[in-house]
Each structure stands twice: as C-alpha cells, then as structure tokens.
Amino acid sequence: MRVVVASTYVPFIKGGTTVIIDSLEAELRKRRVEVDTVRIPLRSAWFELPEQMLAMRCLDLTQASGQPIDRLITIRYPAYAIPHPNKVNWFIHHHRGAYDLWGTEFQDIPNTELGLHTRQMIMAADTRYLNEAQKTYALTKLIADRLRKFNQIEAAGVLYSPLPDSDRFYCGEQGDYFLYTARLTPLKRQNIAVEAMRYTKGNFKLVLAGTGDPPEYAATLKSLVTRYRLEQKIVFTDWISEAEKIKLTADALATLYVAYDEDGLGYSTLESLHARKPVLTLHDSGGPNEIIQDGVNGLTVPPTPQALAAAMDQLWADKRRTLEMGKAAHQSIAEHGITWDHLIERLLS
C-alpha cells in the first residue's frame, strides 16, 4: 500500500501537529508501509483561510511519479479539502474561532458582515470536504461531539494521539513541586495555576515550563507572581530541552494540565501517564477529562484557583495515595488504546 499523509502546519513553530506528522510517518515506515508526507504551510489568519482552502482543493495527490496513491490520510485543517477517492481524515480540530470559540473571549473572527460571511464559508466548506472521506476519525470524544454538532458528521471512532518516544519517560522521585509543561498562552490558563499558589498550604513549588506565546502573557504571569509575593513558590524555566523535560516530569509530585476546552489530551498529560504521575485538570479542560478520572489517576476540579489549590494540597498531604494514582495513570494508556499499533491499524483499515 502506498500512503500519503497530508497536513498543514504553522511555519517556524515546532508544535503538536509537526510532532504528529513526523511520528506518524516514522511509525508507518517501521511497519513497512510505503509512505510520503505532504507538509503544507498555513497562515491561520481567519481572512486568509478561504483562499488557502481553495488552493488545497486544487492539489492532485492521486498519483506520484506515475504510480497511484492508494490512500490519503489528512490531519490538520483544512488539508481534508484535498480530493482523493480513498481519503481518511484523522481530524484534530476545526479553525476554532469559527466554531466552539465563537462568542467567547478567544474568538478571532470579528462579528462583522465580512466576518460572518467568512465563518459561513469555512463551515460550509468543512462540512462538504469532510463528508468526501471514506472515514473521519476524531482526535478525542470532544472533537467527535463538535463534528456532530457543527457539521452533522458522525466520526468513525476516536483515535487518541500516542506519545512519540514514550519509552524515554520514566518515574523518578516524588519531588517537592507540581509541573505544568505547555506554551505560556491564554488558552493554557497558567494564570489559574499561579493564582492557586496564593491559597496552597503545603510547602511545595509550582514549575511552569514553557515560553511565552505571546511574550506579553508570560510578562503578565510574572507580574502576578510579584503582586502576590509568590517568588519563592513559583519557578519559570522558559524553554527547556527534551531531556530536561523528561527529568522534570520524572521527579514531579504530579502534573497540571488546566487548558480551556482542549482539543486533545495535551502532550503534558500523555507524558505524565508514561511517567506514572497523576494529572490535575479542570472540569472545563476538555480532552484530558476523557482520560483523567477524579480520584483514580488524577484529580479534576472546578476551574477556580481555590479548587485547584485544595487539590494540590490533597496530593501533597497523601503521597502514598498520589503514588497509587500515578500507577493508575500509566494503566490508562492501554485502557484507552493510546498506542501506535491501534492508531495505524484503524487508519489503514
């Protein structure tokens, strides 16, 4: 079988989509699948999306060098606009500003005549081109629900993204800190974690590992630390290497993932599962709530600093129970089929 994996990506950002593309290609090759990847740079400004979708519609990936391409697997929007008679979508997310973020503080499309018209074009095109596929798999149950709600499309199933190089993660000591690894950006809501440290009683720290995106948000977080005199309780690492991240995860007491309505599980969540660390998340954090069971492999609490602080104190006070939750977190990987074997079997079936 000759397979092409096609996806868009944001240039100059080594983000989750780039990791997914590279990992899927490598895992397909391990299984002796003839595979090529088509990486399409995308400018995600809302007013440029329609013409970029039209350009992708003009791509012909039915053959290469005179040989037929048996299957096209598309990943990030709007690569699913590419026509192919045997197309399978692994749908990661919409352009969220036109969908679930419409009407929220994170909306990027203006509520103007042009904005409304563009939103309608995006949604109509998405529905048409997604329906062309033989199958559309959703990254999470949350994404499957959005497909059903906004596009009237029933996903063929949920395929969680496995962690690349998962065997590098391990369980170390129970350190004196909680770790939150993610870009410092408003949707990841590190501000709630910072504010939570005002109310904690235990003698532990919060480590925030990630760079500011935008830089102004990182400055805002640091100003909160100064305002509440939390300099001795919160550590900013900025950018860290993969080796440093693995070590920090291994020795954390537990990890946080408190993003708003996250599409996927979050790489931080996956890393924690492999490192046998429980995860703290919030009721409205989206994808992580499909895996994290309150009191079993982590804690899930209301989206307030006070509730998060109480949960952190709970894990700190009962380290034996925290250790047991970490073991259960690792078992969640197999329970939910978060493996490359399961993923590839479905994409090629």
Image: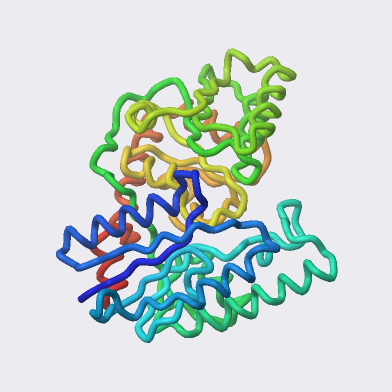
Q: Position of residue 55 (x, y in %)?
A: 54, 72
Q: Position of residue 42 (x, y in %)?
A: 54, 58
Whether residue 308 is visible to the viewer of this picture, yes or no, is no
Q: Residue at x 29, y 75 (%)?
A: 64
Find residue 348 and report its horizontal and vertical position in percent: 27, 74
Left or right for 306, reference 10: right
Q: Residue furthest right?
A: 112
User: Is residue 267 left or right of 1 when viewed as pictured?
Assistant: right
215 left or right of 66 in image: right
Residue 214: x %, y % from top left? 64, 37
Number of numbered labels in the structure image: 0
Q: Which quarter of the image is occupied by the N terminus?
A: bottom left
Q: Quadrant of residue 337?
A: bottom left
**Picture quadrant where residue 116 is located:** bottom right
> Residue shown at 62%/40% (left/top)?
185
Colour scheme employed for the rendering of this structure: rainbow
Answer above or below: position of 122 versus 128: above
Q: Is residue 249 above or below residue 341?
A: above
Residue lying farthest to the left in this orientation: 32
- Who's the residue at 66% across and 34% down the image? 191
Q: Residue furthest front?
A: 65
Residue sitting nearer the eye, 312 or 56: 56
**Do we see residue 38 in this rendering?**
yes
Q: Quadrant of the C terminus?
A: bottom left
Q: 339 or 327: nearer the eye?
A: 339
Q: Residue at x 43, y 46 (%)?
A: 267
Residue 179 or 283: which is nearer the viewer?
A: 179
